[in-house]
Image (spheres, rainbow, N blue to C red):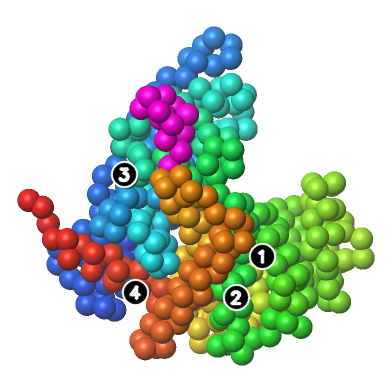
Amino acid sequence: MERAGPSVNPFDTARRQIDIVADLIGINGGVRELLKHPKRELTVNFPVRMDDGSYRVFTGHRVQYNMARGPTKGGIRYHPQVTLDEVRALAAWMTWKCAVVNIPYGGAKGGVVCDPKTLKIGELERLTRRYASEIASFIGPEIDIPAPDVYTDSQTMSWIMDTYSMQKGYSVPGVVTGKPIALGGSEGRGEATGRGCAYVIREAAKDAGVRVKGGTVAVQGFGNAGSVAANLLHDEQGATIVAISDSKGGIVKPEGLNPHTVEEHKRKTGSVVGFPGAKAISNEEILETKADILIPAALENQITGKNADRIQAKMVAEAANGPTLPEADTALFQKKVTVLPDILANAGGVTVSYFEWAQDIQGFFWSLEEVNQRLERVMVRSYSDVRKVAVDKKVHNRSAAYVLAIQRVVDAMKTRGIYP
């Protein structure tokens, strides 16, 4: 989830979700309590030398939520509003996301309280390397594998990989994912979230009776995931993209937009706003646009109890984290709108991160075609697994995805037992 509202404690939300699923599948007692607590968490306060010679102290966190299914996996974000409870919640959600696509990871998350926009490149590097040094004993290819998140990128991962490797005395590319290709990154990682979303839409459309070829699509959020999903739906599945937005506003054209041309316009001007031949539309209005498929790919908490009844789409595919509030889930389910939840629809990113790690630790790399074929297999199978639970238990897809994920974690915990 990008950023919860000021009055919402995200970890309270995460725990409530666990209780809902635990009630549904009969998990009680100590197992339920274990699910509601991170395995371990580390908070570090560390000095960084600034370019002017002064020193500032920064606070960073790393939470490893559950390791029953394997080493933990999750991003590191740099943001002034990072809190320990937010990191705990994100680590929990990563646990379920990895489990729903059945990759052998638990969930983790990290964050540093800072405003990276105010830091120069040298300051960012020193901050990253010092934070990596502070958490180095907690991470590693067999323990916990960080990745990029909000305001971190492949360069950040390169610094962490190098810092960790220098302490080990040899290169350890598998300590992080989201690296550049030159340092052991994977082909296809950059577009994996959007591509995975497009695969799930294709599969779900067959069951939901929703047209993709010849159907219409609205995309809220034309960043990496939203633009890749739009391009693939347009190019490979024959969909018509009728509305697109970014943080500055949106555009709508019922006859259809070429997402590649819109992308070029955004590169030149900084926004999709003002695209020739299209009408202006707000980010709120784009959710209610007449379209067969709606892809919220921007911020959290976009579809609420207030606007759920005005959603015209037959399918909502969550390329963003947490765009739909629980009361909206219920309303959409009653309207027979198919919702593809974030822990399924945007899990292509962590899936190809897993592929990157697997390639790193075996020192053998795959072609782009191989990566995409493997990603497709994982997303198709995962959608099928979620769909089966939804039908069997007569619940909406989000509840089904959580049931599937949490049951897999519980099975691993019970099979392993408690040591000593």
The residue beneath circle 2 is 201
Q: What's under tag 3, amino acid-wise?
A: Ile
- Residue 163's disc number: none
Alpha-carbon span between mark 1 and mark 3: 32 Å
Alpha-carbon span between mark 3 and mark 4: 26 Å
Vertical side of 414 occupied by 165: above or below? above
The residue beneath circle 1 is 229
Segment colored magenta:
161-174
- Residue 8 at least partly seen: yes
* Identity of the residue drawn at 52% across and 42% down: 184
Find out whether the residues at labels 2 and 1 contact each other: C-beta distance under 8 Å: yes
Alpha-carbon span between mark 1 and mark 4: 27 Å
Name the side, left or right, on which 275 lies relative to 357.
right
Front label number (1 vs 4): 1
Alpha-carbon span between mark 3 and mark 2: 33 Å
Q: What's under tag 2, amino acid-wise?
A: Ile
Dot 1 crowding, Cα within 10 Å, few <14, some 14–19, many 20+: many
**In x, y percent, where is residue 97?**
42, 62
Residue that extends furthest to the left in the rendered view of this protein? 420
Residue that extends furthest to the right in the rendered view of this protein? 277
Q: What's under tag 1, amino acid-wise?
A: Ala
The residue beneath circle 4 is 403
The residue beneath circle 3 is 143
Name the side, left or right, on which 60 lies relative to 189.
left
